[in-house]
Amino acid sequence: KTWFKRHFSYACYGYFDLYRIVDVMRIFDRSGQELIVNQRQNQLLKFLYSHFLGRCALKVLTLPFITHIGGCYMNSRFSKRKIQPFIQQNQIDMSQYEKQEYSCYNDFFTRKIKKEARPICMEHDLLIAPADSKLTYYPIHQDTYLTIKDTVYSLSDLLKNRSLAQEYDGGTCLIFRLTVDDYHRYCYIDDGTKEQDIYIPGIFHTVNPVANDYYPIYKQNSRSYSLLHTQHFGDVIYMEVGAMMVGKIVNHSKTSFQRGEEKGYFEFGGSTIVVLFKKDMVVLDEDIIKNSQNNDETRVLMGEKIGIKR
């Protein structure tokens, strides 16, 4: 009986969360205009997680050798033919990016943007977005649960470090969700120094794929995080969450950094950045708070102001 109640509740929560992401969650720009976005990626995820055939496909797609093959294809010249259709389908303005000849799809996916296209706000008491993304704000409490890439985490589960998570109780969590059409390089939000990156491998396990209709899986994505000692925002946790299949996190090896400097990039796949601030360190812009309270996201660009130092 206890087993049934636990799994039934988990399935219901998963159904609601997928419904919210695919059918309800809206995206607004900074002027308050709702954006019409391509939901094909979310609809594919819904199918993979919620249907028996999709879960069978996931078991195959997440095998290590399949992931390796997918990565090899994206790095091969044969993948070049996917570039132009992708640009047209997602209406990407290529005039914002540095001109170059792409050798493969991943070469295109990790393209660099022109500096003038993403000016960095350099006022040190202003908080900037680290990436082009869809932003959600969460206040951090002991019972806070975060939805990241269709998986629900407590903060201690996300970090795999309970004592570190407790240091951020009462603080602020920002989730920057990158989709495949976004610029996939990200930057530092302030000057400072960085401790060694902590890597957490992903987990994928199917639980009784016949009996459950929704969320019959235990899944955590691979992720990497580091503790940043910043000059103006205190000790900040900066985490990259990789895509489940062929996504890869590439961070540059640096122990000191400056505001706006590139921290790294994601290879193919929609990905996510999580930034944690301690209590009483930042105040977010009102539109971001309002949208998040309504379970909606705010479209932000790398380097633009999203809040202020408290």
Image (cartoon, rainbow, N blue to C red):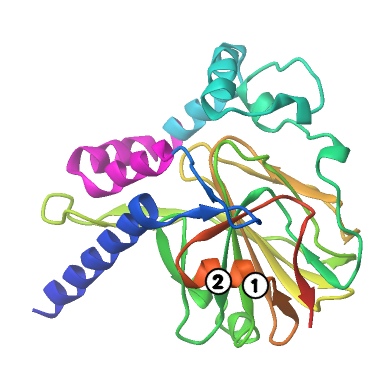
Vertical placement of 136 versus 170: above or below? Answer: above
- Image coords of residue 8 (percent x, y): 17, 69
The secondary structure that dominates the magenta segment is helix
Magenta residue span: 39-65
Residue 211 in which image quadrant: bottom left
Q: Residue at x 54, y 38 (%)?
A: 269
Q: Position of residue 203 (x, y in %)?
A: 42, 55
Q: Position of residue 292 (x, y in %)?
A: 52, 68
Magenta includes 220?
no
**Left-right relation of 212 to 136:** left
The stretch drawn in magenta includes residue 64 = yes
Please name the residue shown 87% across and 39% down the image.
115
Question: Between marks 2 and 1, how big is the CA–CA gap?
Answer: 6 Å
Q: Which mark is residue 286?
A: 1
Q: Is residue 3 above or below residue 101?
A: below
Q: Is residue 293 left or right of residue 93?
A: left
Is the residue 66 above or below the residue 178 in the image? Answer: above
Disc 1: CA contacts within 10 A as few (<14), some (14-19) or many (>=20): few
Of the 4 image quadrants, the one containing the C terminus is: bottom right
Q: Residue at x 69, y 25 (%)?
A: 107
| Amino acid found under the numbered disc labelled 2 | Lys
Residue 241 seen in the figure: no
Instruction: Report crowding for label 2: few under 14, some 14 to 19, many 20 or more residues within 10 A (C-alpha).
Output: some
Q: Which residue is mark 2?
A: 290
